[in-house]
Amino acid sequence: MQGRKDYTEKLFMSFQLSNHVPKENLYRRLRETLDLSFLYKDTKELYGKTGNPSIDPVVFFKLLLTGYLENITSDRKLVEHCSMRMDVLYFLGFDIDEELPWHSTISRTRQLYPIALFETLFNKVFTLCVDAGMVSGHTQAVDSAPVKANASMESLTLKQPKDSVANHLQKVGEENQEPRKNDPPSSTVYITAPDYQLRKLAKHQQKLLDQPISAPGASHEKSQLLSNKTHYSPHDPDARISVKPGKARKLNYRCNMAVDTAEGVISHVQADFADGRDSQYLPGLTRELQGRLKENELTMANLLADTGYSNGSNYSFLEQKGVTGWIPVFGKYKAVVPGFTYNKESDEYTCPAGKPLPFKSYDHSADGRLLKNYWTASKDCTSCPLKSSCVQNMHYKKITRTAYDEQYLRAYSRQQSKRGKQMKKLRQSTVEPVFGSLTQYYGLNKIGVLGKAGAHKVMLLAAIAFNLKKYLKNGGKKPSRAYFIDVIQDFEQAFFDLLAFLNSRYQFS
């Protein structure tokens, strides 16, 4: 006999959400695990004592976390989605007939709350992972990735003055001329970037116009001529033009992130401008990371990163912090000068003809790197038979090296070692999959808000959601085998270093 269901809505019914949400449900477990009551105290000073009640701070953060757990970045769509999910309503503390907060309230509250509040929540969740034995702190993998900003390349406009680069350069030249006695003082500032940078940019743009070659990833010819030095987005002034090989030039933010290698827990995340280098953000990132680990009674011994973080000052900084930096040296660095030998005690080079090149002075490169200069005496090169092939356009031979040559050599030695290759594989298998997960499943494929502060909040929430889901899946397990392998390898390395020192000191046979 065929059945047929007749549906008539009941006017009154007895219904409890808790009876219809399974015990193993993600949001039920999350409600029982995550205590956000501290938010009432931390947000109390942000509200007045009169007026209509605001959205509950706990409900606000639970709504945001639900959005990143469900990969929903639109506040309007998030409210619609939550209203149709019984498990989410139970997590939020709403009955099935209660109306959720308006989507615009979520946007305004996100702007109201400071970054420190989001970081406090990140630290709370990170501590949960530490207490569950999921974080070793011993080895951290660092990487960065561009995240699309909420702005379009078509909306870019020239910085003041609103004129072409050529006219702008002409006006800069006129303003930099010596003023005549009867000329009134100029009250207009035309410079948007250093003069030499603008001239270099104009030369590069003219080359593109003379030889129109489609750059990899360029969506149209105009995009190749835009620069952060001359253009900005009025919609989001903090967004910066950046390009990745094979991809289009876009307005992005940079996400710098550190991941613990024991269980893949995110230990630090921050938003930075997309036009900066990875290497310039490493010191600040390391300080924040060490501070968070110290609060949880953990110590970082190794830091893994790619070549983008290679920098002599960074190698020196990590050594001063007691951290071993497993960062491959930059490709242009040469461990030795071909044909020249270096004497560390006298700090000088010796040329193939046997003439010394002593250290003479310090210098700085165009991008601020500290350099050391070595050169011979003019009389040593005048009668040298090798002068034609050794000295070019000068009366003496000059060698310029980085001031952090010793740190580079130590990093290069680690890179070439067997463990260095293992560390490279460990970094690739740890931090890169986490970036893929955040962009594909945790709402970090695009920054839906404006400003660097807003981007930082978005990245923190995506990292919190990632850590929470990992905690509910793996919480309570013992530290992974990889952690113990790292500790043993560090002990072995320290032992062999001690043997090498004793051998060099006492000449053991």
Image: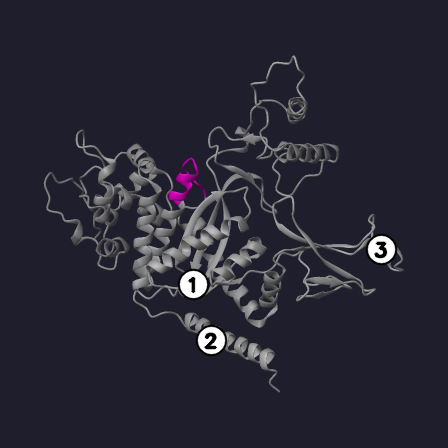
Q: State the mark number for residue 300.
A: 1
Find disc 2 in the rendering and name its residue. Answer: 491
In this image, 318 relative to 95: left or right?
Answer: right
Which of the two residues, 62 or 258, is positioned nearer the viewer here?
258
Whether residue 56 is in magenta: the answer is no
Quadrant hosting residue 497: bottom right
Give the number of the disc on residue 61.
Answer: none
Helix, strand, or loop for circle 3? Answer: helix
Colour scheme of the rendered structure: one colour
Would residue 453 be counted in the magenta stretch? yes
Q: Which residue is mark 3?
A: 379
The residue sitting at 66% across, 67% down in the picture is: 345
Whole-number angstrom distance, CA of label 2 to CA of label 3: 53 Å
Give the structural element (helix, strand or loop) at label 1. Answer: loop
**Residue 348 % position (x, y):** 71, 62
Name the residue furthest bottom: 509
Q: Report crowding for label 3: few under 14, some 14 to 19, many 20 or more residues within 10 A (C-alpha).
A: few
Cα gap from disc 1 to disc 3, whole angstroms: 53 Å
Q: Is residue 260 left or right of residue 420?
A: left
Q: Earlier in the sequence, mark 1 or mark 3?
A: 1
- The residue at 29%/39% (across/down) is 79
* Residue interval drawn in magenta: 446-458
- Residue sitting at x 41%, y 66%: 262
Q: Is residue 122 left or right of residue 49?
A: right
Question: Which amino acid type is shown beneath numbered disc 2?
Answer: Phe
The secondary structure type at the circle numbered 2 is: helix
Q: Pointers 2 and 1 in contact (CB under 8 A)?
A: no
Q: Nearer the viewer, mark 2 or mark 3?
A: 3
Reply above or below: 328 against 240: below
Q: Work out whether 89 lies above or below 53.
A: below
Q: Quadrant of the C terminus?
A: bottom right
